[in-house]
Image (spheres, rainbow, N blue to C red):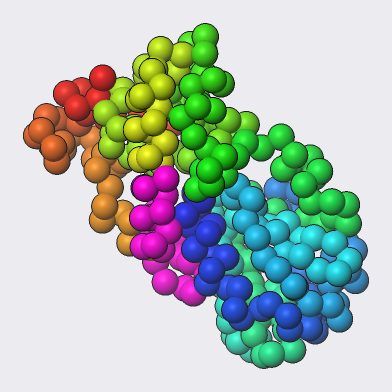
Amino acid sequence: MPELPEVETTLRGISAHVLNSPIRQVSIRNPRLRWPIPEELPDNLLGGSISQIQRRAKYLLFTTHLGTMLIHLGMSGSLRIVQPNTPYDKHDHIEFCFANGNALRLKDPRRFGAVLWTSEPISEHPLLKHLGPEPLTDELNAELLFKLSRNKKIAIKQFIMNAKIVVGVGNIYANEALFASGIHPKRAAGKISKKRYEALCTEIKRILSLAIAQGGTTLKDFLGGDGKPGYFKQELQVYGRKGLACQQCQTVLKEIRLAKRSTVYCPQCQR
């Protein structure tokens, strides 16, 4: 599943190709995504242009003079820039053609992604208004996590993956941040000291920043907006390494399931 670094990589890959160029055509080949693509979307976009693209959590927000288009990549989605005459792939569901000669296509084999529209203030959208802070901003800090975690018995891995606490710390990066900060993934969030939360915040920010710089993590068929794979997979310390030796202490890495998600950790380095 594309996580925050993959979505941020996509944003950076497509922005220069689509910003401020009039939209000449919107082709909806399959409207049946996680939610149906709004029928009025082409009328709202045609003739206008995208003035800004932002990311909020794992949503991409395309601002126009009439409103905002939200795109979520779901489990298997990707956005890529192509020439308008490029043959369609089987799972290309929507295409936006621009006056500058570029086309933007959404490919989503599992169709768990979404393309939505709102003319209301984007911060009040039901999918966004209750989200926690962005992890790469100063709004995420040890003080916040320490305060929100008090008396919480939930495992720390589930705690930091809760989008109401902080957005964008998906399964891959939660595994990696907990390993880097030496925290056992099953430790109760309310039992972690502020000092350890300081280390965890530092590692969340460092690991996500590194993943973005390397284009994300290539898992299955993910490609960035430029059609190139990410390379952060080469940096993974625990995720996907069950049964292999810890690169710090050589202890065999173990795997458990937390909230049905694969969780790999070092029983020696993480307490």
223 drawn magenta = yes
Q: Position of residue 224 (x, y in %)?
A: 48, 66
Splitting the image into 4 quarters, where does residue 49 fall? Answer: bottom right
Instruction: Name, please, the residue furthest toward the left.
Output: 250
Which one is nearer the viewer's eye here, 179 or 228? Answer: 179
Magenta range is 205-229
Q: Position of residue 132 (x, y in %)?
A: 62, 36
Question: Can residue 104 be seen here?
Answer: yes
Residue at point 52%, 72% (across, down): 13
29 drawn magenta = no
In the rendered image, the quadrant that contains the C terminus is top left
Per the picture, the main secondary structure of the magenta-coloured stretch is loop
Residue at point 34%, 33% (across, down): 199
Left or right of 212, for residue 108:
right
Question: Can residue 155 be seen here?
Answer: no
**Does residue 197 lie above or below 209 as drawn?**
above
**Does residue 1 lie above or below 270 as drawn?**
below
**Does residue 37 lie above or below 12 as drawn?**
above
Q: Position of residue 243 (x, y in %)?
A: 18, 34
Left or right of 161, for residue 114:
right
Left or right of 79, for residue 2:
left
Left or right of 143, for residue 35:
right
Residue at point 66%, 37% (across, down): 131
Residue at point 50%, 27% (across, down): 143
**Does residue 241 lie above or below 187 as drawn?**
below
The image shows a total of numbered marks equal to 0
Splitting the image into 4 quarters, where does residue 162 fall? Answer: top right
Q: Position of residue 120 (x, y in %)?
A: 88, 52
